[in-house]
Image (spheres, rainbow, N blue to C red):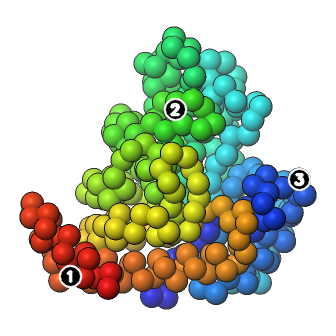
Amino acid sequence: MSEVLFSTRLNSFALGNGLKYPSKTVSTVELIKLASKVKGLNALELNYPEHFTSNSVPELESALRDSKLKVTGIQLRWPAPKFSNGGFTNPEMSIRRDAIKLVAEAIEIAKQLKTDHVLLWPAHDGYEYPLQMNYVEGWNWFKEAMQEIADIDTSIRISIEYKPAEPRGRTLLNTTGAVMKMISDVGRANVGVTLDFGHLLMAKENPAQSAALCLSENKLFGLQLNDSHGAADDGLLVGSIHVTETVEICYYLAKYGYKGTYYFDTDPVREDPIRECEMNIERMKHFIDLGSSLAKKYPDIANGDALHSSEIIWKSLK
């Protein structure tokens, strides 16, 4: 499985001792050195601008080379308070322009670090109250911004990571269907989606269904793995709660040929982050092998016979 790229949330290595938001700032180079201790980890994704404030790009390149970790994506984070009322959907045009400028900078960083993927999490593009957002106007602003950034460099893939809520009460792109509609409206080949397992559970969606439909349109650019109880973004160890759902998504990833990175978006608040990441990799290797085996042996398992498919899944877990 050496060809499979396993990446992880770099900030996980700054957590611990019950603190999800530690007061001590750890440099990005230090975090990369900690990540390099994880057995089986071969990639990282860095947040922009967050991970580029404590170290220069050459310093990061050197640390990545020393750690033998490949960069598979740059994850754009629009920081509050400036963008707390929205990035692409902000009522102020100057802030919308600044949101676009930040993505343009991230694209240049991506090219410097030799990755073709920039992931956008529009965390603040949402609302709390009725009549707070003009939904059509906001949708059009978001679409036009996506078209502009997609055209900057068509060799760079731009993907949207959606989350139904948090930090906003509700987001504009709050379902897989809404994101796919946006991608269709944008109409650019280099625009796709990154699905987060926990975000899908928050939205009461079935991760496998969302992944299968996005794959069928060749629009699944990224995958973020974790687990949760479904009410919030818990960021738990892969397969710790929803084992069957994890098996099913891996079946469809194999069936429809997912080639992207397996990124772990987990929060080891009270756990050893190095061991937690190693367990994510160990489990995910097993789930990928299991999904691939089921897809080859039972390509037509999903034929309406629930007892037949449930029996096969049950036996595969023994």
Crowd around label 1: few <14 · some 14–19 · many ≥20 (10 Å) = few
| Vertical placement of residue 40 versus 88, above or below | below
CB of mark 3 within 8 Å of CB of mark 1? no
**Residue visible at 43% across and 18% down?**
136
Q: Residue reaching furthest top?
A: 131
Q: Which of marks 3 and 1 is nearer the N terminus?
A: 3
Q: Which of marks 2 and 3 is in front?
A: 3
- Locate the C terminus and report the quarter of the image it occupies: bottom left
Q: Return the residue at label 1.
A: 296
Q: Which of the 4 image quarters holds residue 255?
A: bottom left
Q: Residue reaching furthest right?
A: 24
Residues 62 and 34: in front is 34
Residues 87 and 284: in front is 284
Q: Which of the 4 image quarters holds residue 188?
A: top left
**Residue visible at 33% across and 40% down?**
177
CB of mark 2 within 8 Å of CB of mark 3? no
* Disc 3 secondary structure class: loop
Residues 188 and 14: in front is 14
Residue 233 place in picture, x, y as percent: 57, 50
Amino acid under label 1? Lys
Q: Earlier in the sequence, mark 2 or mark 3?
A: 3
| Vertical placement of residue 19 versus 136, above or below | below
* Disc 2 secondary structure class: strand
| Vertical placement of residue 120 versus 216, above or below | above
Disc 3 and disc 1: Cα gap in Å? 49 Å
Residue 128 place in picture, x, y as percent: 57, 22
Q: Return the residue at label 3.
A: 23
Q: Return the residue at label 2.
A: 171
Residue 210 in sight: yes
Amino acid under label 2? Thr
Relative placement, left or right, of 179 versus 60 is: left
